[in-house]
Image (cartoon, rainbow, N blue to C red):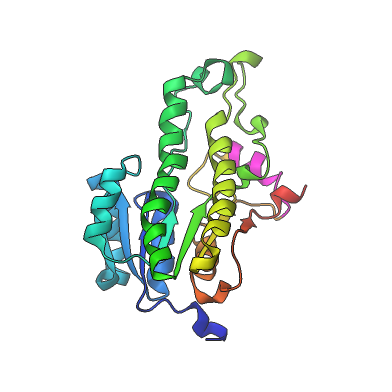
Amino acid sequence: MTGITSFNLTGKRALVTGAAGLLGREHAAALAEAGAEVVLTDIGAAGLAAAQEALDPFYGDRIRVLLMDVTSEESIRAVAQQAGAIDILVNNAAIDPKVTADGVGLELSRLEHFPLAEWDRQIAVGLTGAFLCSRVFGSQMAARKEGVILNIASDLAVIAPDQRLYRRAGLQENEQPVKPVTYSVIKTALLGLTRYLAGYWAEQGVRVNAISPGGVFNQHPDEFVERLSKLIPMGRMAELSEYRAAVQFLCSPASSYMTGQNMVIDGGRSIL
């Protein structure tokens, strides 16, 4: 299989975790566009229904939804039985903590006040969830001697958050909101998980890679967009669809000789 045909995923079944989210839906669309049957999973029925409604007009016959809690191995194994053999797993589920416009959660974002319970909750979803899904679905792939796992990391897996992006006028230094410690730690750990699994299952024909996207524009405040754009050599945030081709590449035979790697797509931010 060569050229453009190597991106063809017809006959493959993919499963995307956190598929109700902004990028989860895009990853699902990318795989369906390449011909795969895609199982959308998430913990919330309403979010899944909205994702299915958005994708159905384009890929209706290739989209399926199943409720799944990535923090529960029992839930994952139940979905594994319902979904059938999974050829491609996209570990996308994560909690991306936000400070609301009215300032709620502002003081708790700082390291000194970050709740241990919140640390545990976010790691359970973003990291332990990826481990559990990889163990369940990846073991099945290894038994069949074929499969692909794609972990969704972040540019903040390779660089530290620039906390100046989140500053607010009129607040003392110890009151300024920040990107919480959990996000970078989880996304960095996903790269370690990627390398480990790639080596562990290499002889079983399971390829494992990661993608580190930069910030995607999603109606962010103008001030934030301006600040972030100044840190990116290309001078802008990503458009929502700009990671589709990368997902198709990493999940298809087009990347057949690639495993254990992290593809950084951040407009050049991490090179500075």
Q: Position of residue 260 (x, y in %)?
A: 60, 59
Asked whether residue 33 is drawn in magenta, I would say no
Q: Position of residue 176 (x, y in %)?
A: 60, 20
Image position of 253 (left or right of 164): left
Answer yes or no: is residue 101 visible.
no
Residue placed most toward the observer, 101 or 90: 90
Image position of 256 (left or right of 31): right
Magenta residues, as a range?
A: 223-233
Q: Position of residue 121 (x, y in %)?
A: 40, 30
Image position of 70 (left or right of 100): left
Is the stretch drawn in magenta largely helix, strand or loop? helix
Residue placed most toward the observer, 141 or 158: 141
- The residue at 44%/51% (across/down) is 92
- The residue at 58%/58% (across/down) is 199
Q: Is 189 located above or below residue 250 in the figure?
A: above
- The residue at 71%/44% (across/down) is 231
Q: Position of residue 224 (x, y in %)?
A: 59, 38
Residue placed most toward the observer, 187 or 219: 187
